Amino acid sequence: MIKYNLKFIYLVLILGMTLLIFGSINSKQNKIGDIRDGSRATPIHLIKLFDADSVQILKNDSLQIPLSTRYTCGECHSYDIINKGFHFNYADKNAIAGRRSEPYIYMDWQKLTVIPLSYREWKETFNPRQVGISPMKFLDLFGTHIPGGGVGEIDSLISPDELFRMEVSGKLEVNCFSCHDATREYDPAEYSSLVQKQNYKWSAVGATNLAVVNGNASKMPENFDIYTPTTYADIDTRTTSPPSINYDLTKFNSNNMVFFDLKRKAENERCYFCHSSVHADDNYLNQWKEEEDVHIAKGMNCVDCHRNGLDHQMVRGYRDEAADYQRPELKSFTCEGCHLGENTELGKAGKNGAPRPLHKGLPNIHFEKLECTVCHSGNLPSENVSFVKTSRAHKLGLHKSNKEPELFPHIQSTVFIRNENGRLEPSNIIYPSYWGIKNGDEIKPIPINEFYDSFNERIKLDTLLNYGKWLSINDSSLISVLKYLNESSGNKKNHVFVTGGKVFELDNGVLESTKEESADFYSWAIGHNVRPSLQSLGVNGCDDCHSFNSDFFFGNVLVESSVKSDSANYNSMTYYSDLNTVYQKAFSLTFLFRPWMKIMIIILVLIIIFVFIIYVSKGLLYVTDRGSALSSKEEGINNV
Amino acid sequence: MFRFIAIIVIIALIYSLFTEFKKKGILWNEIYARFKEGLRISIGHFNNPNKNDFLYKIRMGFYWFTIILVVILILTSFIPVVILGIHMSGILLLLHVIAALFFCFSFTVLVLLTAHNNRLLDSDLTNIEYRDKLYEKLSYWGIVFFSIPAIVSIVLMLYPIFGSEGIEFLNDTHRYSVLMLVIAATIHTYYMIINNKK
């Protein structure tokens, strides 16, 4: 009997354990906000707030603590899935890099340095670690336009040297509000400002209308503890103060719950803060003249195409994305997928009412050689490619941002570049400029923390006169700096200066320059603004591109060099398109005579048709004659 | 699809020519020598002093000039499209476009100068010995016939009348017409060689 009872108990225990394990897995995967019930209405977010220790924040707390998105939003949404999404996995080695995109551009104009950086290790970018940029330094430089996560949050990515400072600042968790806050009061510039002050854990909530954040964590000592005033007793509170938060207590209800106006589908304004670009052309100061992206003008939102699921893997919408991420369904989110695609199991064409283009008179080879964006995106080609300012590179949208149109770094757009598929695509380009150490064919930038104090003096730049313009150095100064750098390393290292697509180095004291691939420009494809058919390239006919002086083929791209003797060089667009200038000129000439050629060929073919009809008619006449003759047994005519 | 059909057609044509010429005892050297002579004629070098007729000279000149252009057109189009399986582009496209313009002109002149000689005669139909001549003439009219869609399809493509699908249809029309034209031209040349040999 006892034995029987034990068996029963074991059975119950095993069953219970199984249910517990599966139950916990299930609950981990499917939090209440992870799956929908099918209602298309937006759920009301009247929620409790939790701090970074997962303790609930109450309106009567004596010391107010910033909310943690990990625990507040993570209460209903699987935060650990979301923070591996595309916007947050930029520093994750295991994340798929995908097509290269806009890099983080490190710039120090006093040291003539412009370096494209990316943790994703896109070709021709440098990993921030390689140039001596620590995670916190990275956030200082670029955190203004990073919606949290990544190096600001993942423990394994945080530098041991910065552990204490990270304790002061807290973690820069994923800022869910940066995309999903639907109020007009959400202030991304305030978020950026808080990140710049290293108020990481305060930054997300500080940008909302729920709280006001003061103070500056970057000015606090490394032993700063918000609960222990003695740790910051020495701080001069006239100039700075410890970070603090003041919640708007009226927003708390009697259950200590707060209403957040959140939207699943982020509004365009949210995307624009990090994804704006503006050309430094005639329209720079005349925003009213600018055209909106045709999709937006038609009432669409960015996220109608750039969609994501719970995993926050944003659809980027480029041709090879499906292959890169091994998600075949992504094919239906490309230009072709919506406008030309077919209805398949993987997706439907005509999403959001996408019209099917006619492309009247456009030879099909264009679809093989060009991305759709060549004709429909970016600025129309001009004689000289213009500069473009982007949110991330030029800190657009921040408080007191620099409004100079030709602000550093100088990004040129639109340049037509041949991609890995052999198609042209409109791109932005930037020429790197940095001091490096050459070892064989490999050139590594000198880490920024290894620049010597006397460096600036040696470069001898008149920064006041050059402010706002690209700086350059003369040959003698360059020689002097390279000599100085080589001598500082005991002549064991070969220091070089990379700029304008060339590598400058000393050969027995003589300055030499060579063109090297590793010194060449960095480019990234652009997809917006999309122009409608009437504003597309080629709408005026073949001459839009195939004319003798076409800006599409022969526009000038500035090869920006920091060396005076090598500056003011221009490349023809064919250099970037990997085309032969002579051939393109010759081919364009054929279009000069094309109208005459068409008329001539029409006349000639009419003559052929006329001759053919005459003789075929005569042949038919003969056959009918011959048939009649045979039937009446008459002699046939000799000649037809 | 076109590529597959074109390869089969070309192989079949080459095979047929080889076997037929072998059967009839025609040497390739003779054909090559004739082609070389044609090249000279096309630039105005006439070997035969008895043939001083101006129209004859014009006809022969245009005939060989057209053949050279056809060879250029075939090489510049078949190499990328049939052999490599890609669209025509680059220098081959440039050559093709230029050669096509001259081809249209010289072919039209040739049609005007040779159409009457290729009219059907009673003897072609009644006399069994003239059967090869009949085939030569029929293939001639086949060349003329297929040249019309081959040229018209391309001219239509140059105007913004048709969309992508229409252009693809015109492209296919051009390709298949040219393939038929090549078949007709090969048959015509074959019978011309046979008839000349007679």
Image (cartoon, rainbow, N blue to C red):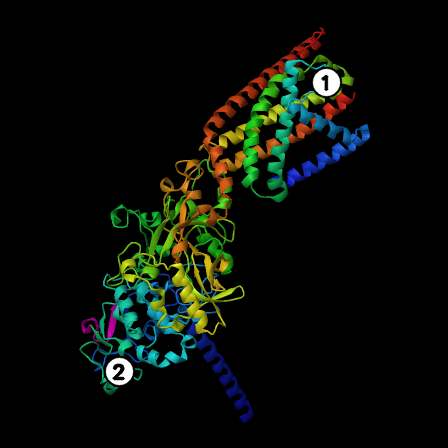
Percent x, y for residue A300? 34, 51
Which residue: 23% across, 63% down?
A: A185
Percent x, y for residue B167? 50, 36
Q: Quadrant of residue A126?
A: bottom left
Q: Is residue A391 above or below residue B179?
A: below
**In the orientation shown, which residue stands out farthest toward the bottom?**
A2
Q: Name the foreground residue: A349 vs A564.
A: A564
Tell me how far mark 2 sits from mark 1, CA to CA: 110 Å
Q: Residue at label 1?
A: B48
A351 relative position to B100: left or right: left
Residue stretch in magenta? A248-261
Is residue A580 located in the magenta-colored stretch of the structure? no
Q: Name the foreground residue: B49 vs A80.
A: B49
Q: Quadrant of residue B55?
A: top right
B148 relative position to A106: left or right: right
A608 relative position to A595: left or right: right
User: Looking at the picture, do discs 2 and 1 lie on one chain?
Assistant: no
Q: Please, what secondary structure does the residue beneath circle 1 have?
A: loop
Which residue: 26% across, 57% down?
A: A403
* Residue A134 visible in the snapshot: no
Three-letter amino acid code at the position of disc 1: Asn
Q: Is residue A138 above or below residue B179?
A: below
* Residue A404 visible in the snapshot: yes
In the rendered structure, the residue with mark 1 lies on which chain?
B
Q: Residue at label 2?
A: A226
In the rendered structure, the residue with mark 2 lies on which chain?
A
Three-letter amino acid code at the position of disc 2: Ile
